[in-house]
Image (cartoon, rainbow, N blue to C red):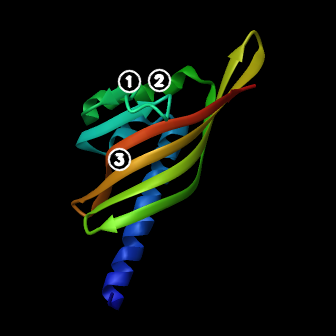
Amino acid sequence: MNYEQKIQEAEDRLAIRELIDSYAYCADSRDAKGQMALFTEDTNFEVYYDPKSETPSQVITNNKDLLPVFDNLNTYKSTMHFNGQSTVKLFGDKATGVTYCMAHHLTMEDDKQKLMIAAIRYHDTFVKQNDQWLFAERKLLVDWIENR
């Protein structure tokens, strides 16, 4: 791999990490439209509440239908998504990756705070369109949930 290829790979890896972190930032700041802009038009978004199941609990197959999913975060008083390690494999203008996330969801019930913490793994397929990395597919796998 020559120097220019190494620079391009580093730039692509940084842009993909920024995409992953932008997703969490948009979620926590309740920017559903900003979150939607991180996905391709024909994106595939799947949620697995049972990560061992081969059948997703929810499937969205285009960008426009993501709004109610992301807007649902408004049911919480606050959220905080902490992205951890991620692995990315680059294939030119496509890439795949897995990212770990601890998602905290705060609600108020009878003047008491309730906290739901979800351990999440995202299995992603990324694509570079017009020099911008986007999610072509995002599979959200909930490994476990703790309620406090």
* Spot occupied by residue 91 in the image (x, y as percentages of width and height): 29, 67
The residue shown at (24%, 34%) is: 62
Lower sequence index among marks 2 and 3: 3
Q: Is residue 29 visible?
A: no
Quarter placement of the N terminus: bottom left
What element does badge 2 sit on? helix
Marking on residue 2: none
Looking at the rendered structure, the kind of residue marked 2 is Asn
- Residue that lies at the very extreme toward the right in this rendered image: 112
Q: For the residues marked 1 and 3, what is the alpha-carbon distance in whole angstroms?
A: 15 Å
Q: Is residue 143 left or right of residue 34?
A: right
The residue shown at (42%, 75%) is: 10
- Residue that lies at the very extreme toward the top in this rendered image: 110
* Spot occupied by residue 20 in the image (x, y as percentages of width and height): 46, 52
Residue 119 against residue 128 in the figure, above or below: above
What element does badge 1 sit on? helix
Label count reads 3
What element does badge 3 sit on? loop
Q: For the residues marked 2 and 3, what is the alpha-carbon distance in whole angstroms?
A: 17 Å
Marks 1/2 in contact by CB < 8 Å: the verdict is yes
Q: Is residue 148 visible?
A: yes
Marks 2/3 in contact by CB < 8 Å: the verdict is no
* Spot occupied by residue 96 in the image (x, y as percentages of width and height): 36, 57
The residue shown at (51%, 44%) is: 121
Q: Is residue 76 left or right of residue 45?
A: right
Quarter placement of the C terminus: top right
Task: List the residue tagged with mark 3.
Answer: 38
Task: List the residue tagged with mark 2.
Answer: 72
Task: List the residue tagged with mark 1.
Answer: 68
* Spot occupied by residue 140 in the image (x, y as percentages of width and height): 45, 38
Looking at the rendered structure, the kind of residue marked 3 is Leu
Residue 102 against residue 56 in the figure, above or below: below
